[in-house]
Image (cartoon, rainbow, N blue to C red):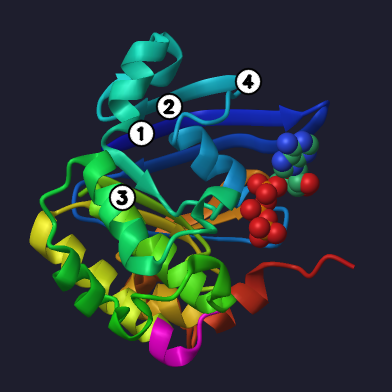
Amino acid sequence: MIKVQNLHKSYKGKSVLRGLHFQANQREIIGVIGKNGAGKSTFLEIIMTLKSYDKGEVAVFDQDLQKLSEQQQQAIRANISAVLQPTQFYKNLKVEELLRLFKAYYRSDIDIKQIMKDFKLESHKKTYFEKLSGGWKQKVSLAIAFLSKPKLIILDEPTTGLDPHMRNTLWAYITEYNRKTGATVILTTHYMDEVETYCDKVLLINDGKAEIFTTPENILALGYSSINDFYLQNVYETV
Ligand SMILES: Nc1ncnc2c1ncn2[C@@H]1O[C@H](COP(=O)(O)OP(=O)(O)OP(=O)(O)O)[C@@H](O)[C@H]1O
């Protein structure tokens, strides 16, 4: 699905990624972790073809991103979905209307009633998006992301700000969607319990590189009591 070799990216001389290696196969759920500012979002945006990079190779669906025309990049984007940042555009629409709009946009055959049930959105289906709390907005954005039936789904901190029930609902949907469709899911998170419970692999970005890229089981087999314990012992706090 994705192969990244020796990826380098800097912003105005500030080096963020410095030789990152990564690979994602079909059906994998991969958690990307690392300190604030480690470069996780930058990495996801590069894979999504939203950001350029300075050096290295990034292949998505077997195609080298740097060799693609704008049109070919569009074709790749059609198979990727991401959590959309809510914009002004959402403001004057009710939850159900928004979902119907995106269903039409993606020409999706997903049943709106079903997706509202899966994400437990029914009680707010007639609420205007702008009136929802932050967590509910996040949940609706996630439901929209799944509407396009992507082969690759990229989620930047999808559970930040969600209460435990909402986190549970979201993870139930991610794992079920992954099981049913074989889609690959790559997400960033600061919750190490999510990595331990739900992810097939974990990528720790530290000093611009993949400090670790393996299964949570392999990390625990090294003797750590949890992924959180591993993180705290290996990633030094920025002071
Ligand atoms: N457009 C930009 N221009 C300049 N610097 C940027 C830009 N985007 C990100 N950066 C810098 O690059 C570094 C990595 O940012 P990035 O958002 O990728 O980190 P992150 O790991 O996702 O952080 P967090 O966990 O806080 O969300 C940070 O120091 C950030 O300030």
| Closer to the camera in the image, 109 or 128 | 128
Give, as a single range, the part of the protein colored magenta: 161-166
Left or right of 103, for residue 111: left
Magenta includes 37?
no
Q: Position of residue 165 (x, y in %)?
A: 40, 91
| Quarter the N terminus occupies | top left
Residue labelled with disc 3: 101
Q: Position of residue 152 (x, y in %)?
A: 28, 45
Q: Secondary structure at mark 4?
A: loop
Q: Which residue is rendered at x = 25% and y = 30% of the image? A: 61
Amino acid type of the residue tagged 3 in the rendering: Leu
Q: Which residue is rendered at x = 52% and y = 34% of the image? A: 46
Whole-Å distance between the Cαs marked 4 and 3?
37 Å
Amino acid type of the residue tagged 4 in the rendering: Asp
Residue labelled with disc 1: 3
Q: Is residue 118 above or below residue 154?
A: below
Left or right of 57, for residue 72: left
| Quarter the C terminus occupies | bottom right
